[in-house]
Image: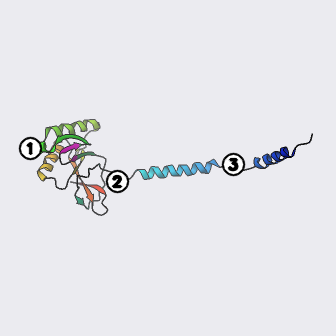
């Protein structure tokens, strides 16, 4: 029996397309592997972003030491926060006659117990984010409370003068 013209055309079409090359998945997998490694390397940067409200104006510094992953204590106009949670009011600390505030010390002790690691010899590390206009007597009370709670390695958050990147200076 004789084939129709349409059947011959379809047969020719299938014969021609049967030998076409397929996509090489090996090179595609190589590209994606390189992309994944590139993104992993670039995502772990040396800059730590410290959550800071716009009301806090950090002092400028020429410090080049990058910040580490430590507990953050923030002093705002009204409150004192540890890791973003209000611990005490600033006026309560100002009215305190002694150098160690018990409520703040209790929160710092709680944060130390949550870490589960023993305290290093130099003391636990903490970063204080405070406005550049913070009175020294208030800063001294905060630092005394930190030292009493075992946070002896105190850093103050500052703006780096050269490129306005946020860093901390060791004191």
Bounds of the magenta span?
74-81
Q: Secondary structure at mark 3?
A: loop
Q: Secondary structure at mark 1?
A: helix
* Residue contact at pointers 1 and 2, CB within 8 angstroms: no
Q: Which residue is mark 3?
A: 22
Disc 1/disc 3 C-alpha distance (Å): 78 Å
Q: Which residue is mark 1?
A: 95
Q: Nearer the viewer, mark 1 or mark 2?
A: 1
Q: Which residue is mark 2?
A: 47
Q: Is residue 12 left or right of residue 123?
A: right
> Tag 3: Cα neighbours inside 10 Å, few (<14), some, or many (≥20)?
few
**Residue at image location 12% in from the left, 42% down from the top:** 92
**Precedes in sequence: disc 1 or disc 3:** 3
Q: How many marks?
A: 3
Residue 132 screen position, x and y as percent: 19, 56
Task: Decide whether the magenta segment is chiefly helix, strand or loop.
Answer: strand
> Tag 1: Cα neighbours inside 10 Å, few (<14), some, or many (≥20)?
few
**Precedes in sequence: disc 2 or disc 3:** 3
Disc 1/disc 2 C-alpha distance (Å): 37 Å
Q: Is residue 21 left or right of residue 133?
A: right
Q: Is residue 80 magenta?
A: yes
> Tag 2: Cα neighbours inside 10 Å, few (<14), some, or many (≥20)?
few
Residue 53 screen position, x and y as percent: 26, 50
Residue 20 screen position, x and y as percent: 73, 50
Compared to residue 116, the image places residue 169 above or below, namely below
User: In the displayed image of the protein, which residue is found farthest to the right?
Assistant: 1
**Residue at image location 50% in from the left, 49% down from the top:** 36
User: In the displayed image of the protein, which residue is found farthest to the left?
Assistant: 97
**Quadrant holding the C terminus:** bottom left
**Residue at image location 16% in from the left, 55% down from the top:** 133
Q: Is residue 85 magenta?
A: no
């Amino acid at each position: 029996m004789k084939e129709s013209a349409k059947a011959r055309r379809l047969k020719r079409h299938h014969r021609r397309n049967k030998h076409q090359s397929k996509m090489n998945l090996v090179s595609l997998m190589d590209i994606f592997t390189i992309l994944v490694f590139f993104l992993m390397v670039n995502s772990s940067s040396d800059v730590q972003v410290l959550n800071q409200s716009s009301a806090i104006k950090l002092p400028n510094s020429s410090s080049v030491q990058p910040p580490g992953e430590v507990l953050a204590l923030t002093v705002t106009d009204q409150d004192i926060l540890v890791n973003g949670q209000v611990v005490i009011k600033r006026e309560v600390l100002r009215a305190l006659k002694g150098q160690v505030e018990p409520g703040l010390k209790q929160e710092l002790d709680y944060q130390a117990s949550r870490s589960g690691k023993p305290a290093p010899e130099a003391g636990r590390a903490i970063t204080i984010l405070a406005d550049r206009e913070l009175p020294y007597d208030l800063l001294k009370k905060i630092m005394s409370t930190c030292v009493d709670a075992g946070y002896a390695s105190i850093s103050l958050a500052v703006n780096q003068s050269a490129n306005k990147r946020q860093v901390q200076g060791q004191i």
